[in-house]
Image (spheres, helix red, strand yellow):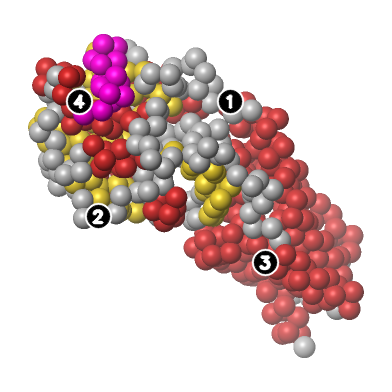
Amino acid sequence: MVWMKKFFLYLTVFITGMCVMAIEMTASRFLAPFFGASILVWSSIIGVVMAALALGYFYGGKFADHYGNSTKPLFLVIFITGIFVDLVAFFGRSLLRDFALSAGGDSFGVIFGSLFATVILFAIPLIFLGMVSPMAARIGVEKNTDNVGSVVGNLYAFSTVGSLFGVFLPALVMIPFIGTARTFIVFGTVLILLGAAGLRSIIALLAVIISAVLALSVPVTLYADNPAVIAEVESSYNTIHVREDGDGTRYMVINDGRGVQSQYREGEVLTGRYWDAVALGPLLNPEIKNMLVLGVAGGTSLRVAHHFYPELIIDGVDVDEAVFDLAKRFFALPQDDNVRLFASDGRLFVAEKENDSYDFVMIDTYTKEIDIPFHLATREFFHDIDRVLSSSGIMLINIAVMGSRTEVAEAITNTVAEVFPHTYHFWFPGTSSWLVFASNEDFMKDAVNVNRVPDPRLASIFSQFKKDAVVVSHNPQAMYFTDDRAPIELLSRL
C-alpha cells in the first residue's frame, strides 16, 4: 500500500509537469493567429509562465505547511486546474480575438495585448500547477525525514521528465492531428481525472465524464460564423483559411492577421498586386530558364509566372505543406512537370542547393502578416541567394510596409545592397508593397523593349518599374541585418 501511494505521488508530479509545458507550448499556437509567434509573443508567454509558477511555488509552500501530509488539498487544486484548462478551449479564442482587435498591431499592442491575454487565460491554471510541487514534496517527505533530499530530487526529476513529454506531445502529435482547442481539452481532462482519482469522489468522476463528452463538441474552427470562409485548416505551423467574396475572388489568409497571402479569381491572371511583379523577371533578363519562389502560400506568383512563361521550370518552396493542397483546390495552382513543390524552410532549401541553380529567385515569406522571418532577411542569407543565382540571375523580395514607416524596408534593402552591386527598390503601384530587385549585373540595360511585353497590364507595370525604380547603394552607416543582429520583429511593429 505504501509503494502504491508513493507511485501515485510520482505519477502526479509527472502528469502536472507534463501539463505545465503542454499549456505553454499550446498557448503559443493558441495566440499565434491573433498576435503572431514572434519573439515578442514568446516573451509574454514565458514571462507569464515563470511569474505564475513562482507564485504557485510560494503559495504551494504555505498550503503544504498548513495542511501537512493531507492529500485532499493537492488533488482538489489539480481538479480545479483541469476545469480552468478546459474552459480555455471553449472561450479562449473569442477572448483572444477581442484582445487582438483592441490591442492593435504595433509593438505596444503585440507585447501588451499578448501579455494581457496570456495572464487572463493561463495565469490561474499555471499558478495552481506551480503549487503542486511543494505540496507533493511535503507529502513525500512526511515519513522520510532522513531522505528529504532524495525524495524531493526524485519528485522534481519525475516532474521534469513529464515536462519533456509536455514539450513533444503537443508539438509533434496532438496539435497537428487534433488541433489546439482539443489539445487543451485532453490535458484539462487528464488533470480532472487525476484530481478525481486522488479525491476518490463520485462527483469528480462524473465531471470527468462530462468533460470527455464536451471534448467531442468543442469548436475546432475559428470561422464557423463567417459564410465567406469556404475552407479552414490548422496545420503544424498556422491556422489557414480561404475566403470567397461575392464577386468570386478568393483570398488565402494565414492566421488571423491583416494581410492576404494569395488571391485568385477565375478567368483572371494578373491581380493588380505585388504578385504580378514576378512576371517582370524574364522581361529584365530574357535568358531566364528557371526560377525559385520562396513562400508559395496559394501560389499566386507561381500561377502568374507559369501563365506568361509556361516553359519556365518553377520550384516553389513553403515551410507549411498544408498550403499546397489549398492552392491546388482553390487557387488554380498549375500542376504539370514544370512546377515542382517543396515543403521546407526557405533558408535550409537554399543552403542545400548547388551553385548557379536558378536564374530568378522571388522571396515572399512572412510569419504572420507583416513579419518577415529574420533569418530570411540577413546578409548571410542573401549571400546564400547570391550563390544559387546564375551570373546574370535576379533576386526579388517583397517587403510589406504598414503605414508610412519604412525602416524595415530600408534596412532590408540596405542589406541586399551590401551583397548585390545592382540593387533597386520599387513601390508596386497602388499598394504598400516595397519590392527590391537585385543582381550582380545591371539588368536594366538588358531589359526587353516594353512594346514586346505580351499583356497590356503587364506592360503598364513594366513601364512603371523602368520609370520609378530607385537605384540603391549600400550605406555601412545605416542599419542592415545580420544573423547576429536583426531586430526585424520589433522594427516592423513600430
Can you say which quadrant of the picture contains the N terminus? bottom right
Q: Is residue 101 left or right of residue 416?
A: right
First reached walking from the N terminus: tag 2 or tag 1: 1
- Amino acid type, residue under disc 2 in the picture: Asp
* Residue at the spot of label 2: 336
* Residue at the spot of label 4: 453
Q: Residue at the spot x=81%, y=65% of the render? A: 79
* Label placed on residue 106: 1
Q: CA distance from mark 2 to mark 3?
A: 42 Å
Residue 17 percent coordinates (x, y): 65, 62
- Asked whether 104 or 452 is in front, the reply is 452
Marks counted in the figure total 4
Q: Secondary structure at mark 2?
A: loop
Q: Secondary structure at mark 3?
A: helix
* Label placed on residue 186: 3
Q: Residue at the spot x=90%, y=74% of the render? A: 203
* Residue 147 in sight: no
- Magenta highlight range: 454-469
* Label placed on residue 261: none
